[in-house]
Amino acid sequence: MVKRVKDNVKWVGYMDWELNTFHGEDYSITNGSSQNAYLVSEQKNVLIDTVWFPHRFDFVNNLKTAIDLKKIDAVVVNHGETDHSGALVTLLEEIPNVPLYCTANAVKSLEGQYGKRGWNFKVVKTGDSIDIGNGKKLVFIEMPFIHWPDSMATYLTGDNILFSMDAFGQHYAVEELFNDKADKCTLLKEALKYYVNIVNPYSQMVARKLNEIKAMNLDIDMIAPSHGAIWRDNPIQIIDLYSKWSSGYSEDMISIVYDTMWDGTKKLAHRIADKIKSISPDTVLKIFSVSKQDKNDIMTDIFKSKAVLVGSPTVCNDIMASMTGFLAFLKQLKFKNKKAMVFGCYGWSGEGNKILRSKMEEAGFKVIDSEVKSFWNPTTELNESIEKAVREVLL
Ligand code: FEO
């Protein structure tokens, strides 16, 4: 379906209600998603991005309802990742000589994925533009590492639309297209989940790029990302949120994250939680079992937390494999300015806490000296060490 965005700008993407994971199985999707592509029709007709490979035929057939493909003067490829470039091969079989505007890194990523096909690349840098007639231009803004080296945004003058690619997006299917038509709570939740699990590792680049975009003094009426709702009502709100999120964000919140074999470490998690609540009742507290709850949701709450307490029993001179995998993902996300504390049960050798400590330090957390270590199941003898550790967390 083709949908009107503004004046001569149409949405020609794919609303993906069945999508339930992304990046392989690394990102859970619970509210659908979309791959947004846009058709700008002034004196020149420009397609901005395509959709994921499985939807290539639906995409091209739908695009034909909006325009005779031979009338497309240019295609902008803001990003080479396959969820946006996957339909290019099929499209370019019909219009093989159409100019493709993209960054130098996008040429590498497109040829790396689809082979050298002799496509008509036009490499652009920040500030380059193409005149599309009727007094309007498309201006390119490189966005390296937000979130791939090849990423860029494209700004449409006159209509004042920033096609921001993945930045400011959400995995959230909104048939009505716009943020003012979406459920606000779900929209902000999905925007944050997306930021934490996809964009946060590049926070430093995000902060720099936001300053650069602000310095360009662009009039922005809409921010049209490549996933989810278009920010039409107060579009600057999502730029302001990205500014906050990219600056070592935290709230008065603590997350306790554990796995357990026979409930000893689970009991310890709840004993620690009770102590936190008794000392600091207003601190928001979340308790997660990594093997039972969604890891992307846990990461989102860890992002909001000022401290994360991680627990595992010692198993075969190590920690539980579920925790090892979880902590590897945690390290990738490069959280900043957060404390950590470790805890766990043991019956024999007891290396679990030491391994947890080392992994949390590697992940960039400030691990406090105090910890809680329970020989077999937790007893009242641990009261003192729990209180000491909790007070150090809350300092
Ligand atoms: Fe939505 Fe980086 O692709």
Image: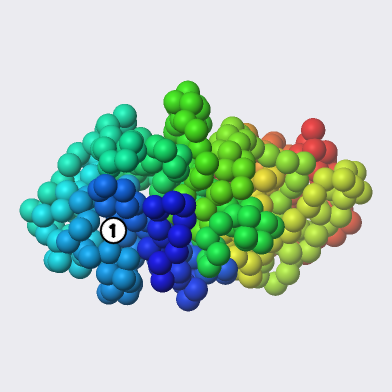
Callout 1: 10 Å neighbours few (<14), some, many (20+)? Answer: many
Question: Left or right of 4: which side holds 98?
Answer: left
The amino acid pointed to by label 1 is Ser
In the image as oriented, which residue stretches furthest toward the top? 215
Question: Left or right of 154: which side holds 46?
Answer: left
Residue 183 image-quadrant placement: bottom right
Residue in front for this viewpoint, 160 or 185: 160
In the image as oriented, which residue stretches furthest toward the front? 134
Placement of the N terminus among the 4 image quadrants: bottom left
Identify which residue is drawn at 57% across, 61% down.
295
Residue 239 image-quadrant placement: top right
Residue in front for this viewpoint, 42 or 361: 42
Instruction: Please tell me whether residue 394 is drawn above or below residue 261 in the rendered image.
Output: above
The answer to whether any part of residue 189 appears in the image is no
Instruction: Please tell me whether residue 106 is drawn above or below residue 209 in the rendered image.
Output: below
The answer to whether any part of residue 177 appears in the image is yes
